Amino acid sequence: MIKKIGVLTSGGDGPGMNAAIRSVVRCGIFHGLEVAGVIRGYQGLVDGEVIGLGHRSVSNIINRGGTILKTARSEDFKTEKGQNKAIETLKKHAIDALIVIGGDGTYRGAQVLYEKYQVPVIGLPGTIDNDLFGTDQTIGCKTAVHTALEAIDKVRDTAHSMERIFVIEVMGNKSGYIALEVALGAGAEDVLIPDRKFDYKSLCENIVEGNGKGKISWMIITAEGAAKAPEVAAQIHELTGLETRFVVLGHVQRGGVPLGADRILATRLGARAVDLLLQGVTGKAVGVLEDEINVVDLAMAYKRENKHVDEYLRLMKLLR
Ligand code: F6P
């Protein structure tokens, strides 16, 4: 019988993780469970960093970016030695089950705990990349897009005023989600994403053609995993002779006050994760499909998924 659950955040943080922690803690307590927080994700599990989480310890965090539990990418947990230490930590603190919040790496870690060590575990999708299978949306992705758009709107002002081409790099090493959404929301002229081939020649041909018709400013979005902004800007300048600048938005996209959409999603998923553990369900990831809660095997969820490329983008010739 589950009496005590643990919760951790792992990998890159995302806005809304705190709302998920809060939901897990409050729902756990509602069901009469004790709740423990593991600090720094799997690294904290290896190092034995565990704190008690009461009702009040998650007050006033629903609107805060980052994660009060801190997060890390743990190399130690990938080793047998590290995993054994993690299991010792769970035993020492009498943690019967775990809820992990993070992306594909976090889910892989959870799968190890579930499959190799039979730890009851449920995963919640917490990543700005929105690239997990079994959910339309991950906690943090909407806020990240919004944050990027706010910054890009500012760049647009100067791009237009100074009649320049701007290349803007957004996050997404393997995922084109932020780049695609941002391109649509910012009204960008072009977007480069991983998994989709592009060539500078045709990119520049479009620019030269537009320039010939009197177009003088462009916004080109690139996902970090598709091409780096300085390189794209240099190529455009070389091939077109037009003045080109670049901006790398970087980690600004990971911070800030979570949008309502992320808080609400996090709260719903956190509550369901607790329910599932109490029903004896384990080795699963909880997400949302067409606004309904969706539960899939962890081993499926971490296989990642490139989200649907909106047909609108094709029609607008935004995608190459
Ligand atoms: O997974 C989220 C993410 O922000 C990716 O978009 C990005 O490639 C990566 O994390 C950056 O990781 P780090 O903060 O470790 O440099």
Image: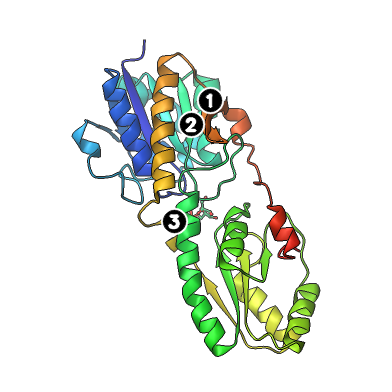
Q: Residue 196: give x, y in percent of width and height.
A: 74, 57
Q: Residue 248: give x, y in percent of width and height.
A: 52, 70
The numbered disc on residue 123 is: 2
Q: Closer to the N terminus: mark 3 or mark 2?
A: 2
Does the closest atom of ligand 1 sit within 8 Å of the Cβ of label 3?
yes
Q: Could you tell me which residue is drawn at 77 percent across and 77 percent down?
A: 206
Q: Is residue 317 left or right of residue 288?
A: right
Q: Closer to the N terminus: mark 1 or mark 3?
A: 3
Q: Is residue 137 above or below residue 175?
A: above
Q: Is residue 279 above or below residue 169?
A: above
**Can residue 98 be seen by looking at this rendering?**
no
**Between 158 and 98, which is closer to the camera in this rendering?**
158
Q: What is the basis of the colouring in this image?
A: rainbow
| Secondary element at tag 1 | strand
**Residue that badge 3 annotates:** 254
Q: On the rendered image, what quadrant is the N terminus found in?
A: top left
- Residue 318 sits in quarter: bottom right
